[in-house]
Amino acid sequence: MSTEDNNPAQNAPKTFSEIMEQLNAVLDKAAKAVSAGTPIDPATLQQIMNLIHSAETSFAPFANTFTPKDRTRLVGGGIKNLGFIETAYESASANSQR
């Protein structure tokens, strides 16, 4: 691995897709090394971990879009705890018209 590969400031990806492209390239390189019987060097492992961390960080703002009010609605409607089908069945059986 050359010194320019180890410089994170030089190769720092900007967008999520750039991060994933770079991660894919590093993982391909590591897979080829492993299939050839060569162990993965610590610098490559560190680069993989850094890219995964960068991907998690850049994706974090989009990962949880529910507000506390949305979560309350889901629990209150029985969607999250019991599920809609179970809640509807219980209501129908309790109000049967036999």
Image: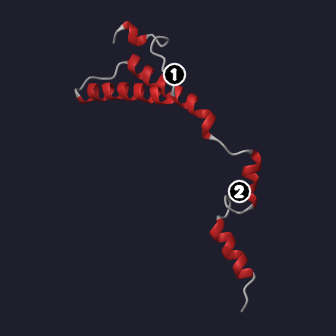
- Please name the amino acid that badge 1 sits on: Lys
Disc 1, SS: loop
Judged left or right of residue 97, residue 21 is left
Residue under numbered circle 1: 14
Nearer to me, 8 or 43 = 8
In this picture, is 66 found above or below 83?
Answer: above
Judged left or right of residue 29, residue 91 is right
Percent x, y of residue 76: 76, 60
- Please name the amino acid that badge 2 sits on: Leu
Percent x, y of residue 74: 71, 56
Residue under numbered circle 2: 74
| Residue depicted at 71% across the width and 92% down the height | 98
Q: Which mark is residue 81?
A: none
Percent x, y of residue 4: 39, 8
Q: Quadrant of residue 78?
A: bottom right
| Residue depicted at 67% across the width and 64% down the height | 82
In this picture, is 73 found above or below 53?
Answer: below
Q: Quadrant of residue 24?
A: top left
Percent x, y of residue 43: 40, 16
Question: Of tags 1 and 2, which is closer to the observer?
Answer: 1
Disc 2, SS: helix
Instruction: Give the alpha-carbon distance from disc 1 to disc 2, as whole Å.
Output: 35 Å
| Residue depicted at 26% across the width and 23% down the height | 38
Residue extending farthest bottom: 98
